Amino acid sequence: MSKFNILVLHGPNLNLLGRREPDIYGHLTLANINEILEQESARLKVGLSCFQSNHEGLLVDTIHGAVDNYQGIVINAGAYTHTSVAIRDALAGVGLPVVEVHLSNIYCREEFRHHSYIAPVAVGQISGFGANSYCLGLHALVNYLEKSS
Ligand code: DQA
């Protein structure tokens, strides 16, 4: 059994990766990214589950459900990053360590993307490295968990 189980959450529109604005988000599909994360988690010897939803409430429910089954969360909340007090409160409520990730560098884009409701309840944020943001986020979270266990 793995020492740590990590939940990776993908928010709205990330199911369109591969065909969605590839100049911004790249050519990999969400399935490609999840596969890379599976391989990386095997190398790190941690358990991993990935979940995507376009629905805020479903993401909130999934965060609530994570509390007894996972030791940490990697989240790309997509556009909900910039709007969702509910997702922020859910993350704060369960109290699991969170790493926030973004494919694009949200600070180089439109001003409305510069604010994150998630950042203040996250251990840290990784933004701008394409699909690699997820791998960096996974590594950062596992490293954080190992140091604090
Ligand atoms: C994103 C950035 C968000 O601003 C945007 O709404 C997304 C994707 C990213 O990964 O770069 O859907 O979270």
Image (cartoon, rainbow, N blue to C red):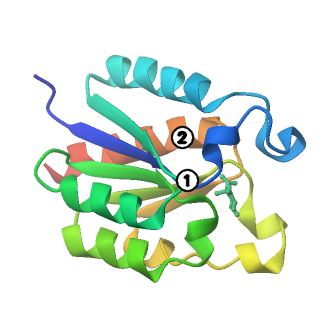
| Kind of residue indicated by mark 2 | Tyr
Neighbour tally class for label 1: few under 14, some 14-19, many 20 plus, Cα within 10 Å: many
Image location (x, y in percent) of residue 111? 80, 79
Q: Earlier in the sequence, mark 2 or mark 1?
A: 1
Judging by the rendered image, the residue that carries numbered circle 2 is 134
Q: What is the quadrant of residue 123 in the picture?
A: bottom left
Q: Secondary structure at mark 1?
A: strand
Comparing 56 with 135, the one in front is: 56
Residue 72 position (above or below residue 34) = below
Respond yes or no on whether mark 1 lies under 8 Å from ligand 1.
yes
- Ligand 1 occupies quarter: bottom right
| In this picture, residue 114 sits left or right of residue 145 | right
Residue 25 to residue 109: above or below? above
Residue at (79%, 42%) from the top-left corner?
A: 20
The numbered dot on residue 41 is none
Residue indicated by mark 1 = 101
How far across and down, in percent of the image, does residue 34 sit? 50, 28
Q: Residue at x 60, y 32 (%)?
A: 30
Q: Is residue 104 left or right of residue 33?
A: right
Q: What residue do we see at 40% from left, 36% from top?
A: 50
* Dot 1 amino acid type: Val
| Left or right position of 10 against 57 | right
State which quarter of the image contains the N terminus.
Answer: top left
Describe the element under mark 2 as helix, strand or loop: helix
Choose between 96 and 136: the one closer to the eye: 96
| Residue 36, above or below 67 | above
| Residue 61 locus on image (x, y percent) | 29, 61
Above or below residue 37? Residue 125 is below
Q: CA distance from mark 2 to mark 1?
A: 6 Å
Mark 2–mark 1 CB contact (< 8 Å): yes
The x, y position of residue 37, in whole percent, is 47, 27
Based on the displayed image, in which of its 4 quarters is residue 31 positioned? Answer: top right
